[in-house]
Amino acid sequence: MISLLAQMLGDSIWVAWAIAIVIVLPVVMIALDELAESLTNRRSALAGPILFLRNVVLPALAFFILLTRILNLPPDNTLVRIVITIVGIVVIFSALQLLNAVLFTDTAPTAKIISATGRFVAVPASWRSRVPPIGRDLLRFLIVGIGCAIVLSRVWNLDVGGLFTALGVSTIVLGLALQEPLGNIFSGIVLLMQRPFDVGDTIRADGNIAEVKEMTWRAAIVQTAQNEVREIPHSILAKQVVGNFSRAETYSVEPIPLAFPASLPPNLVRQNLEELCVKTPGVLHDPAPSAVVAGISGSTINYTVTFSVDSYAELATTRQTFLTRLWYATRRKRFGLPPLGAADATALAYPREAVRQRIDQVSLLSRLAPEVKDQLAGCADIEIYGQGENLMVEGTLASGVFIVLDGSVCLSVKPINFPAITIECLDKGGLIGDPNPGAICFTTAEAHTDAEVLLLNHDALNLILKHDPHLLRQIAQTVESMRKGAEAARHLAENKNPSRDSWDDSPNKES
């Protein structure tokens, strides 16, 4: 447009530039103002650079055109040089703002979080969060350096090469004086190029396992599992072997050593340990957990258990859950753990007298004759389940009938294409299971708290059938009523409108 006006006006080129400032500049500023408002409404990080371009860069350029094109001041005029320098500074600042908005800032409303040092950074899920601050600073310094060199050489006619030579000599002196800080800086640059870890990764370095929160010029800022924020200088990281847990597909716990009596078949112990691993929340099924014989020591056999989890953050919790459930499982399986490992496994079983006393406390069995209770104490058993353990699982073979002696047990069903729903919680005296041999469990029973239960296996149920068929019929009727309730809950869930997320109107939902 300016060249077209120049052809129309001939030698009066300054008129064309004046018309451009009077007409074109306001139109461009109005357009940028509308664009900035639109970006602000969308909470875009580009709104700031656009406003700076409109309010600072364009006026500075207009003033430069006024001096050089309309007033025809020569380029070597001091005022012109000062104005060009100011224009260069605002253009560099505008470029830095635009670079920060495009490369280092998310445009979403929740894109920023406060880092461990109080600085704002991008959300961990974005690729921008993986750019260390040292990389951003290097890029900014590069842009500023190139811009300053252009202004000094083109506008002020300074010998930039000589300036760099002088700076080189000074740099040698400063380098000797600041050897350690500069070593950290250059080590940080090497780490930035190699990228052995990113912000958000969990690493092992300097004897610590911690999450990388930020990368500064001097050090990597990490946070340990004890929520302690530490700074590890780059020079130390560059000299050490850094382990990155976040680069691995899975995370394996350190081998867990265990010991059991030599009287127990090793294959049986290994099978039970691997089954316990599979049932522990957080343990991956692929790769499968393993339990191997590590050696024989006197009257015990040593085993080593290993398993994997999805993330390093789950290691400690999963290990604790496994060891907790191991205690309950070994009590039920009569497997001895140290210091009981060398003892007879039968020492872990409840004495017959204790089982007999527990039977007397069950109101459902009060109608049995004393001699029948004595016989029942010989075939029934008392088991303890830890919080979160399953007494039985929907779809598996039932092992008999459980009567809750202490604690709480919750029953749930898993409808097709729906999450599991809790249908009932049983306290002391509650009955779960199925008395029919070969029956399939119709619910999942999970210990809501630590629960102690009386297990009436099929031998015990046959004894009750022999001496009191009416009692067994009463148990079967209770189980059948629970089965119908479970089927009704499953049917209601599977026929419920999938678009509705609330289960508040379901009579089977636990409040």
Image: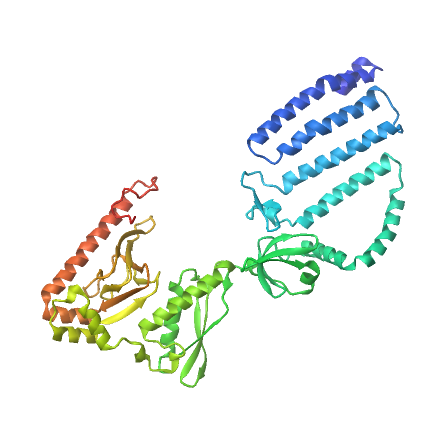
Q: Is residue 378 shown above or below 91?
A: below
The image shows residue 40 at horizontal and vertical percentages of 58, 31
Q: Is 458 left or right of 178, judged from the image as shown?
A: left
Coordinates of residue 327 in the picture (x, y in percent): 37, 70
The residue located at (27%, 42%) in the rendering is 505
Instruction: Using the image, determine if residue 249 lies above or below residue 50.
Output: below
Q: Residue at x 86, y 47 (%)?
A: 164
Question: Farthest residue in the bottom direction?
Answer: 298
Q: Is residue 493 visible?
A: yes
Q: How many marks?
A: 0
Q: Above or below — where is 359 with respect to 262?
A: above
The answer to which of 223 and 334 lies nearer the viewer is 223
Question: 51 or 250, which lies in front?
Answer: 51
Looking at the picture, how far across and down is residue 313, in whole percent? Answer: 50, 58
Task: Measuring from the top left, give residue 187's x and y in whole percent.
Answer: 72, 58
Q: Is residue 261 visible?
A: no
**Which color scheme did the rendering employ for the protein?**
rainbow
Residue nearer the viewer, 209 or 151: 209
- Write the residue at 75% across / 44% down: 142
Q: Is residue 142 left or right of residue 110?
A: right
Q: Quadrant of the N terminus?
A: top right
Q: Left or right: where does residue 73 sit relative to residue 417?
A: right
Q: Residue 286's quadrant in the figure?
A: bottom left
Q: Quadrant of residue 265?
A: bottom left
